[in-house]
Image: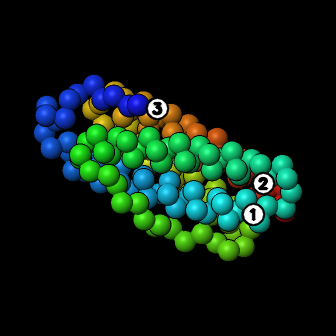
């Protein structure tokens, strides 16, 4: 998918360092979640739960790619993603961690959407925020089942 921004780079006053910092943070979060959910999928107690985590992970890969493209358009550089959160090595702790992380990410992406002036950036972060809300509900469901 090719992303186009409404405002050409040369009109953007050094495209807002705070926004770029937050997008870099979002990229690291997605990168960490992709690694974490690979682990969680392997530890899932049944096929249904494993498949759902694999689907969630596909969304995170999509977010990662989209945010990386936006970052590159804004900065002219490729992001250098890093693992920023340790993923619990035990399944139950893992789904609790994932639930909290998804919930926090919902708010974080809405903040980025508010912060951005470009409609394309706003739209992508609002859409990702809705995905994270949906992920949070799935992890909450797994938590209640695991009791
Ligand atoms: Fe995501
Ligand atoms: Fe998510």
Q: Residue furthest bottom?
A: 89
Colour scheme shown: rainbow
- Return the disc, 2 or 1, that comes first in the chain's sequence: 1
Q: Position of residue 121 (x, y in %)?
A: 36, 34
Total marks drawn? 3
**From the viewer's perspective, is the residue at label 3 or at label 2 nearer?**
3
Residue depicted at x 35% and y 40%: 70
Look at mark 3 in the image and give the residue it sits on.
1
Q: Position of residue 90 (x, y in %)?
A: 72, 73
* Mark pair 2, 1: CA separation: 7 Å
Q: Is mark 2 within 8 Å of ligand 2?
A: no
Q: Residues within 10 Å of mark 3 (few under 14, many from 20)?
A: few
Residue 72 lies in what quarter of the image?
A: top left
Q: Are marks 2 and 1 in contact (CB under 8 Å)?
A: yes
Look at mark 1 in the image and give the residue it sits on.
42
Residue depicted at x 55% and y 48%: 61
Q: Secondary structure at mark 3?
A: loop
Q: Residues within 10 Å of mark 2 (few under 14, many from 20)?
A: some
The answer to whether residue 4 is above or below residue 50 is: above
Is any part of residue 111 visible from this angle? no
* Mark pair 3, 2: CA separation: 27 Å
Look at mark 2 in the image and give the residue it sits on.
50
Residue depicted at x 57% and y 52%: 102
Q: Is residue 22 left or right of residue 52?
A: left
Q: Residues within 10 Å of mark 1 (few under 14, many from 20)?
A: few
The answer to whether residue 92 is above or below residue 126 is: below
Q: Secondary structure at mark 2?
A: helix
- Return the disc, 3 or 1, that comes first in the chain's sequence: 3
**From the viewer's perspective, is the residue at label 3 or at label 1 nearer?**
3
């Amino acid at each position: 998918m090719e992303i186009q921004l409404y405002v050409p780079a040369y009109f953007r006053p050094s495209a807002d360092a705070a926004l770029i910092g937050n997008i870099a943070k979002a990229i690291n979060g997605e990168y960490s979640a992709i690694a974490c959910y690979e682990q969680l999928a392997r530890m899932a107690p049944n096929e249904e739960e494993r498949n759902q985590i694999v689907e969630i992970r596909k969304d995170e890969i999509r977010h990662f790619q989209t945010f990386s493209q936006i970052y590159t358009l804004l900065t002219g550089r490729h992001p250098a993603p890093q693992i920023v959160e340790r993923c619990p090595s035990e399944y139950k702790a893992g789904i609790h961690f994932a639930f909290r992380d998804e919930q926090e990410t919902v708010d974080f992406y809405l903040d980025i959407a508010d912060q951005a002036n470009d409609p394309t950036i706003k739209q992508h972060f609002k859409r990702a925020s809705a995905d994270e809300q949906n992920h949070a509900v799935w992890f909450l469901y797994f938590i209640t089942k695991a009791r």
